[in-house]
Amino acid sequence: MSDPLKILIMSAEMVPFAKTGGLADVSGALPKALARLGDDVRVVLPRYGRIDPERFSMAEEVQTFPVPMDDLQEPVSILKTDTVPGVPVYFVNNEKYFNREGIYGYPDDGERFILYCRAALEMLRQLNWKPDIIHCNDWHTGIVPNWLKTTYKNDPFFADTASVFTIHNLQYQGLFGWRILEVAGIEEYGFLHHPQIGELADVVDLMARGLNFADVINTVSERYAQEILTPEFGEKLDPLLIDRRERLFGILNGVDYDEINPATDRYIAQNFDGDHLDDREANKLALQRESNLPQDPSVPLVGMVSRLADQKGFDLLAGCFDAMMNCLNIQFVLLGTGDQHYHNVFSQFAQKYPDRVAIYLTFNAALAQKIYAGSDMFLMPSRFEPCGLGQLISLRYGSIPVVRHTGGLADTIQNFDPRTNQGNGFSFERYDQIDLYTALVRAVENYKHSDTWRILQERGMQADYSWSSSARKYEDLYRRALEFRRREAAVTR
């Protein structure tokens, strides 16, 4: 048995405190899984205005201290809560930059997340807690590996600390101007330079800095780790990733089975498990009723819970939606927000097919669970998908995924072949309307065979996509990062 690790996880989001996407789910579940393995794991995030200190029983852990921002000092205090079992969670508290209702989308986002990162590192000194690993997530924390190799390079406090940088979505990179280098105190080092990425010489790309300086890089599925080495998925950073490919790994996200469990879900009409699948029908009828659709258990109900964007395949879906509704006897329920164009398009579909289509352009956690529990099929036709959690949750709830074969969707969903009775869902290869439509036709045809469908449901519900296995892989990744760090230190001594 290896000694327990001391791990600081840095993330802009974490359930149950602040969430816009899957990053929050990962940041909420992975620390608990690591703590169960015996590691000393802690999390730090900004204290946004939407986070109520009283609700989460927060107390001041570190009194106000100055954090350098260019040639100024910004006052910061640290709050702490113990509401997450086994995981202390710290909050960087600063009225000027974080006491806002939103999380992202402000003109000073660069300054906001530089302050968060610098305060998190200085917090460690205040706590006198030296982590073995600082686990950074997405562009918001990309400056930290950069600092550990520059500003803090000769700081004995961080001498034995390694950095891990996780890519959740390479598309969002945190692009800013020269001013951010001054705010971060690293203007003397200038822009990054790469012979095949000319843009890096003219912009501060915080994602690229995380990739360039981290001891180890990973992303959230094995296939996506390979896909981002190509121009199609590399978002112009594939040459940099290729240079560092010996330090690039893929670890599939898990699902927090303590929270994601149809047997205990308080939001759904009828609890059920794999041994009591007949009880699931009550959830379908309840969803149909709530969505003002005819209550008919025999009609296949297709569900989606998604951000409405091209990445999620909504251009494909919009292009073949009329064919789906005209040629297939299905119902369709969608929950999500996103691009206004798709808000308009799918609102029109709801008006066009009022007795078969229900569109909810909002975020509603309770309704999301009802869709997982009540739909027969769960649609994810993504152009790219680093991991995807929707298909993992749908398997857990007995809703059969219909997905594009990409990224984490390809790693988790195997196309069902009725000849061999192998597979756990339905997938298509090409990013094409007809291929999406054909996959849905296959799902609908197999739905007509109740025995086959029951096997698919049981297979999905019996699969283990919990965090237990993934957490151990992260432990291995952390130890690999420490070894890289030690080798580099030995060379420079």
Image (cartoon, rainbow, N blue to C red):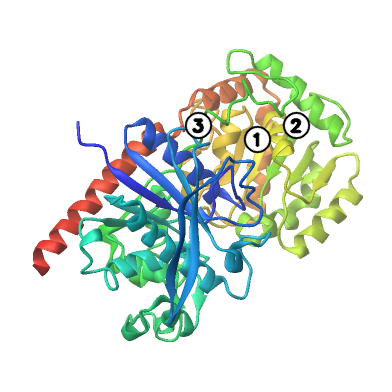
Residue at 60% over, 69% down: 96
C-alpha separation, residue under disc 2 versus residue under disc 1: 9 Å
Residues under numbered marks 2 and 1 in contact, where contact means CB atoms less than 8 Å apart:
yes
Mark 3 lies on a secondary structure that is: loop
Q: How far across and down, in percent of the image, does residue 373 sit?
A: 68, 29
Mark 1 Cα-neighbour bin, 10 Å: few <14, some 14–19, many ≥20: many
**Which of pointers 3 and 1 lies earlier in the amino acid sequence?**
3
Mark 3 Cα-neighbour bin, 10 Å: few <14, some 14–19, many ≥20: some
Which of 96 and 482 lies nearest the eye of the viewer? Answer: 96
Q: What residue type is labelled 3?
A: Gly
Which of 344 and 323 lies nearest the eye of the viewer? Answer: 344
Numbered mark located on residue 443 in the image: 1
Which of 313 and 156 lies nearest the eye of the viewer? Answer: 156
Q: Which amino acid does label 1 sit on?
A: Ala
Q: Which amino acid does label 2 sit on?
A: Pro
**Which of pointers 3 and 2 lies earlier in the amino acid sequence?**
2
Report the residue marked by disc 3: 423
Numbered mark located on residue 300 in the image: 2
Horizontal side of 279 relative to 294 (left or right) equals: left
